[in-house]
Amino acid sequence: MLLRSLAEDDTKLLKSLIHVFEHNRFSADGVNNGADALEYAKTNQYDGLILEVMMPELDGLEVLKNLRSLGINTPAMFLTARTEVYQRVKGIEAGANDYLAKPFSTAELVARVVLC
């Protein structure tokens, strides 16, 4: 069982994502803002991070840049509605291992998380 940290500002989607991961035998913690995402990622040992780019307090790009600057190299994926090529490039440049656009297929998300 792998532990994932999920950061998604849409509470309903966050609950759904936690359910999806638990159904697929993952453990998952969820937060709905960037400040909490950063604190969780800094203080807990996670096998992977899933971040929304657009979150209150700190956006996902800033969260990941901050983590990478601290030497925290936990695999990370952006799951976001920001789909333009330049936005995906910014995500990868910030240190993401993967980038999945919304709307997304649950099966594809789980498959990517297993590989991330």
Image: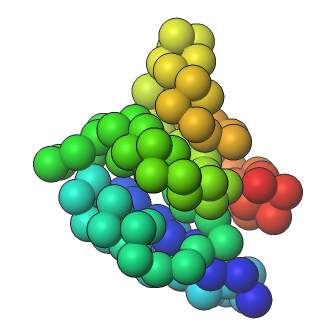
Quick check: 45 left or right of 112?
Answer: left
Looking at the image, what colour scheme do you see? rainbow
Which residue does the image show at 54% across and 52% down from the upper left? 71
Q: Foreground: 28 or 105?
A: 28
Query: Is 98 drawn above or below residue 8 in the view shown?
Result: above
Residue 70 pos. (x, y %): 45, 52
Which residue does the image show at 34% across and 60% down from the upper left? 38
Q: Foreground: 94 or 24?
A: 94
Quick check: 32 left or right of 92?
Answer: left
Looking at the image, the residue that sits furthest to the left is 57
Quadrant the N terminus occupies: bottom right
> How many callouts does the rendering have?
0
Residue 55 pos. (x, y %): 26, 46
Do we see residue 64 in this rendering?
Answer: no
Q: Foreground: 16 or 95?
A: 95
Residue 11 pos. (x, y %): 28, 66
Which residue does the image show at 58% across and 75% down from the upper left? 46
Q: Quadrant of residue 104?
A: top right
Quadrant the C terminus occupies: bottom right
Do we see residue 77 in this rendering?
Answer: yes
Looking at the image, the residue that sits furthest to the top is 86
Query: Is 98 drawn above or below residue 74 in the view shown?
Result: above
Q: Foreground: 45 or 99?
A: 45
